[in-house]
């Protein structure tokens, strides 16, 4: 009797019916995952071992990561226990094999970062969502910073981490070579660093004293490590990425030594100053906020088309977003084919940008220069509307993505995976906006 009441119809199982009735099913229908997967499948040779997930499944897995805000281990657990999650990732509802690889999401991000072309992705998304968008002729743009998951860097902490890493490698090499470790004052300076770290008020004099001792220790440890590396068979257990880390530490030493000998801030600043050993590509991004003046992460110049965000430029360096206005408008024209109004911050309102926008006939929210136009009251009202939309809709979307779509602190380990992490977070947020619009229209 139960089989007759709950039997499948037309080959569609109950799990599939329940999937399309769920919120994940609505999200799946708001994304052209199959179309995006075809672009990647054309690049693959088809040789090698059959992967656990298909290309569509890999894209779905990265979307699930930001939809549920889970760790990689929790995401793999959902794939093993949740039929809806498996269907979203292009797997059978009752997968016969238990996935034990907790690194599957991280390797998937790395793989997609290599094969996914985001220019094509954005064009597919724009054509797929074209019926859900209305005011596509209005362009909004602003810049924000997506912070990396790193400790707030200081000179003392950076030097201590470098010393700690060198001492650990030195210990491993001496053990492999079966020789006695060279002497150093590592333990004494370790106690001095811990005592300094526990101080509630750290004076500049004490900080300078600890920094000087750490610089001297790091110089000595680097010399001892170079001597051990010159010995025969000393690099058999030396990992390839350790050479890159060692070069980073040497660069840190040179920069910190220069900074210690030239403490005057009026002197020439250090170019490409390293603030993290694990992520040497990070740079300080000055934001000017009251609670957080400096952020460490990737800076993004964003354009918004009817509430949908697209990345125009992303970089770990603190670029000037005002110089990206023309490229942003051109990108808007590629996606929406028309741009008549533009809302942007004051930093974009340079004379060069004003002249270029006037030649294109694009109305902006920039305060006018020179004589007032005859229809100034109408223009003022239009500028007020653009200002309000930009400050609420665009800037509000930044906070929504950071708080609800796993973009508050980026926990990826490389530049490529950080970029793909941010892109999929924004993609998931855009898809959920489309889902809410479709539900509102249907209601």
Image (cartoon, rainbow, N blue to C red):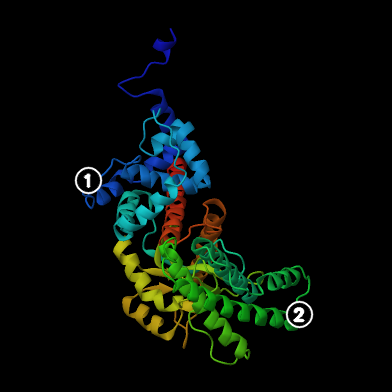
Q: Using the image as rendered, state which of residue 417 and residue 26 is in the foreground.
A: 417
41 lies above or below 168: above
Front residue of 102 and 405 = 102
Q: Which mark is residue 47?
A: 1
Q: Check disc 2: other Cα within 10 Å, few if <14, some if 14-19, many if 20+.
A: few
Figure quadrant of residue 327: bottom left
Query: In percent of the image, x 21 and y 50: which residue is there?
Result: 42
Q: Residue at x 46, y 49 (%)?
A: 433
- Residue 408 sits in quarter: bottom right
Please tell me whether residue 168 is drawn above or below residue 430 in the rendered image: below
| Gap between marks 1 and 2 measured at Cα | 62 Å
* Quarter of the figure that contains the N terminus: top left
Q: Is residue 379 visible?
A: no
Residue 307 image offset from top left, x and y in percent: 45, 57
Tell me the element at label 2.
loop
Secondary structure under the numbered disc 1 in the rendered image: loop
Q: Which residue is mark 2?
A: 203
- Against 346, residue 118 (above or below) is above
- Asked whether, in this view, residue 136 is left or right of residue 316, the answer is left
- 138 vs 174, left or right, is left
Location of residue 362 (image quadrant): bottom left
| Residue 57: image location, x then y, percent | 36, 42
The correct choice, above or below, for 43 with respect to 229 in the image is above
Q: Is residue 46 left or right of residue 194?
A: left
Q: Residue furthest top?
A: 1
């Amino acid at each position: 009797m139960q089989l007759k009441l709950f039997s499948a119809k037309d080959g569609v199982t109950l799990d599939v019916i329940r999937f399309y009735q769920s919120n994940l099913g609505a999200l799946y229908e708001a994304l052209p995952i199959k179309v995006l997967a075809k672009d990647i499948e054309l690049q693959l040779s088809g040789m090698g071992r059959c992967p656990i997930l298909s290309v569509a499944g890999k894209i779905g897995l990265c979307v699930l990561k930001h939809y549920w805000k889970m760790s990689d281990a929790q995401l793999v657990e959902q794939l093993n226990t949740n039929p809806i999650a498996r269907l979203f990732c292009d797997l059978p509802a009752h997968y016969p094999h238990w996935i034990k690889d907790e690194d599957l999401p991280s390797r998937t991000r790395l793989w997609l970062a290599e094969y996914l072309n985001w220019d094509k992705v954005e064009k597919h998304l724009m054509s797929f969502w074209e019926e859900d968008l209305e005011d596509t002729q209005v362009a909004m743009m602003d810049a924000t910073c997506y912070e990396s998951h790193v400790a707030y860097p200081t000179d003392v902490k950076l030097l201590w981490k470098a010393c700690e890493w060198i001492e650990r490698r030195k210990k491993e090499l001496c053990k492999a070579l079966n020789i006695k470790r060279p002497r150093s004052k590592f333990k004494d300076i370790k106690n001095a660093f811990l005592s300094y770290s526990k101080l509630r008020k750290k004076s500049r004099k004490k900080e300078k004293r600890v920094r000087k001792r750490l610089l001297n220790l790091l110089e000595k440890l680097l010399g001892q490590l170079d001597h051990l590396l010159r010995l025969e068979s000393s690099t058999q257990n030396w990992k390839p990425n350790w050479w890159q880390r060692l070069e980073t530490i040497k660069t840190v030493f040179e920069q910190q030594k220069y900074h210690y000998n030239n403490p005057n801030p009026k002197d020439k600043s250090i170019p490409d100053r390293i603030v993290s050993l694990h992520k040497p590509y990070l740079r300080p991004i000055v934001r000017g906020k009251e609670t957080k003046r400096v952020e460490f992460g990737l800076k993004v110049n964003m354009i918004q088309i009817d509430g949908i965000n697209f990345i125009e430029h992303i970089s770990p360096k603190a670029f000037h977003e005002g110089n990206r206005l023309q490229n942003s408008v051109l990108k808007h024209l590629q996606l929406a084919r028309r741009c008549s109004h533009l809302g942007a911050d004051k930093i974009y309102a340079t004379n060069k940008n004003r002249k270029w926008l006037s030649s294109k006939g694009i109305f902006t929210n920039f305060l006018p220069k020179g004589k007032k136009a005859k229809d100034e009251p109408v223009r003022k009202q239009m500028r007020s509307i653009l200002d309000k939309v930009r400050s609420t809709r665009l800037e509000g979307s930044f906070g929504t993505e950071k708080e609800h779509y796993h973009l508050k602190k980026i926990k990826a380990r490389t530049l490529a995976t950080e970029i793909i992490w941010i892109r999929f977070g924004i993609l998931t947020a855009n898809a959920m906006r489309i889902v809410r619009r479709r539900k509102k229209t249907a209601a």
